[in-house]
Image (cartoon, helix red, strand yellow):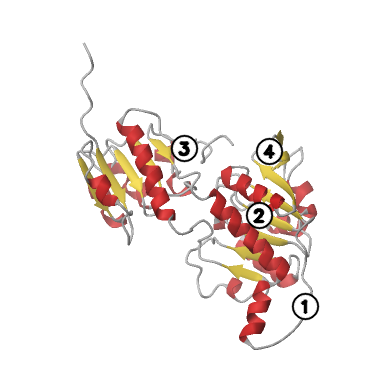
Amino acid sequence: MSAAPRPAPHLVILHGDTLPPGHERIDADPRLASVRYATADRLAEALPGAQALFVWDLFSTAVAAAWPKADALRWVHAATAGVDNLMFPALVDSDVVVTNSRGVFDRPMAEYVLGLVLSFAKDFPGSHDLQRDRVWRHRETEPIAGRRALVIGTGPIGRAIAAQLAAAGMTVEAAGRTARTDPDLGDVVEASLDSTGPDLGDALPRADYVVVAAPLTDQTRGLISTRALSLMKPTARLINVARGSIVDEDALVRALRDGAVAGAALDVFETEPLPESSPLWDLPGVIISPHMSGDIVGWRSELVRLFTDNLDRFLNGEDPRNIVDKRRGYVSGP
């Protein structure tokens, strides 16, 4: 005798000021019992009885607060690559499957990082300032071919960045969870300053550009510390397109003021939006952008396309794409 089919599931979409593009098609899916929309303050009301949750409010921490009401949840999908906001103990210890949007941001972020490297090397900010002031001042710029980049993070985003920088003629090293030899990246050092093997202490002094592209985990939180910054060349630049809490911002401010590093391009911050009172706004050699390195035209539609593919898999009883290893905090594998 065949097992009775599962009843149609209820889906909750956690959103902020905007709804996912094409959400009407999700609403009309006859395989769903209902689609409930909730902002952060109403999530607890929407969760009871729901089997699936789509976190469209990209960096919301509302799921942790509403978690006690998640009495039937089987799957959570995040419209982000990083899922640090979902790695609270109750969810990590549960049987709920978490998936992310790995793959959507790889190439756009790699292009953005290359643009930042070129901005530093060719002094595009300086040209903009001189043009604004109507000043004609000839300068010489730096090459990037032959310069060394250290990419911290060996997931798809880090790999795409490494490939883009290598294609531009740079020598690229990588740092990951463990030291190893990687078929694409070569010798990878451990993303740590306390390893018995090759680690950041070996790689940082060699780098002209240090690119942070790792997920925020217990291992990477505060990784770019006073000690790490002290190991960098005074001519080196730091680029962070990952999570703000990987970099000790106070230590970075001191390093920039003291000339311990030459500059920083920051797309992410410990507090977002970056407060107007932050000294980072006014420090020379700093490029600030509002968490946009992966956001190209059409990115929201790509996020929805990935979610609906996973929704099909969920409804068909198949394994979804991009299952997060909740103990590590990211999707395992290259």
Instruction: Say which quarter of the image contains residue 311.
Output: top left
Q: Is residue 192 visible?
A: no
Of the residues under marks 1 and 2, which one precedes in the sequence?
1
Q: Residues within 10 Å of mark 2 (few under 14, many from 20)?
A: many
Left or right of residue 261: residue 13: left
Residue, x 76% and y 48% (percent of image)?
203
Label 3 residue SS:
loop
Of the residues under marks 3 and 1, which one precedes in the sequence?
1
Residue, x 43% and y 40% (percent of image)?
89
| Contact between labelled residues 3 and 2, with CB atoms less than 8 Å apart | no
Of the residues under marks 2 and 3, which one precedes in the sequence?
2
Left or right of residue 23: residue 175: right
Q: Position of residue 292 (x, y in %)?
A: 50, 61
Label 4 residue SS:
loop
| Contact between labelled residues 4 and 2, with CB atoms less than 8 Å apart | no
- Looking at this rendering, what residue extends furthest in the top direction? 1
Quadrant of image for the C terminus: top right
The residue wearing badge 1 is: 139
Of the residues under marks 4 and 3, which one precedes in the sequence?
4
- Between tags 2 and 4, which lies in front? 4
The residue wearing badge 2 is: 211
How far apart are the two marked residues, 2 and 4, measured between alpha carbons?
17 Å
* Callout 3 amino acid: Asn
Instruction: Say which quarter of the image contains residue 137.
Output: bottom right
- Between tags 1 and 2, which lies in front? 1
Which of the labelled discs sits on residue 184, or is there none? Answer: 4
Q: Is residue 75 above or below residue 246?
A: above
Label 2 residue SS:
strand
- Between tags 3 and 1, which lies in front? 1
